[in-house]
Amino acid sequence: MTAPTPSDAHGPQGPILGHLPLNDFATVVRSAPLVSIDLVVVRNHSHILLGQRSNRPAQGYWFVPGGRIYKNETMQQAQRRIAESEIGITPDLLETSLKPQWLGAYEHFYADSFAAQNAVTTHYVALAHLLHVPESFEPAHRDAQHQAWRWWPLQQALSSPEVHHFSQSYVRDLQQPRVCK
């Protein structure tokens, strides 16, 4: 993920601290849950945008765009950063036209971690937001987290073993919203 833009470089508690030194981040992953923003991007109420993950956890699976919230970064700043850095949605478009809708809070437990170390698991608390995009929308670029982007018909995404079950839970909830995840 890219660093916040200069105008977003400070959160309510001071400078946004994006990338931690690798050893510090590994300690956090071993010791605590990570809080993330997931973007459930849908067009025509029939297709979901999924990226094929390059990195652990969920490496090789098709997954919604998303990422962790950085220290001192507000949820809104994280949402803007992730939308822009992963799929090219500008903050202006996100806030004026797309207006993300709250989908829910989800817990994701993975048997592995970014470091591929034995017995190191990953726990995310994912704050999911729904984005309805125009039919013409295509992701602007690939980022370091994804090998490719693809629009999946909702029913195909729900049944494919290539789509991670955490992303499938978003599709299920689009069809039957629930209060708690």
Image: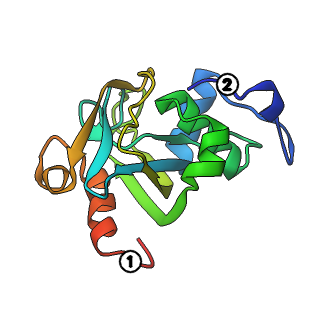
Residue 3, label in figure: 2
144 vs 34: above or below:
above
Task: Quickly name the residue at label 1.
Answer: 178
The extreme bottom residue here reads: 179
Closer to us: 172 or 72: 172
Left/right of residue 27 with respect to residue 160 in the rendered view: right
Can residue 69 be seen by looking at this rendering? no
174 vs 168: above or below:
below
- Mark 1: amino acid: Arg
x%, y% of residue 60?
24, 30
- Mark 2: amino acid: Ala
Can residue 85 be seen by looking at this rendering? yes
Q: Mark 2 vs mark 1: which is more N-terminal?
A: 2
x%, y% of residue 167?
31, 51
x%, y% of residue 64?
37, 44
84 vs 105: above or below:
above
175 vs 132: above or below:
below
Closer to us: 44 or 145: 44
Q: Which of the 4 image quarters holds residue 71? A: top right
**Residue at 86% in and 48% down:** 12
Quadrant placement of the N terminus: top right
Residue 30, label in figure: none
Q: How is the image coloured?
A: rainbow
**Residue at 30% in and 75% down:** 176
Characterize the local packing of mark 1: few (<14), some (14-19) or many (20 or more) Cα atoms within 10 angstroms.
few
**Residue at 54% in and 38% down:** 83
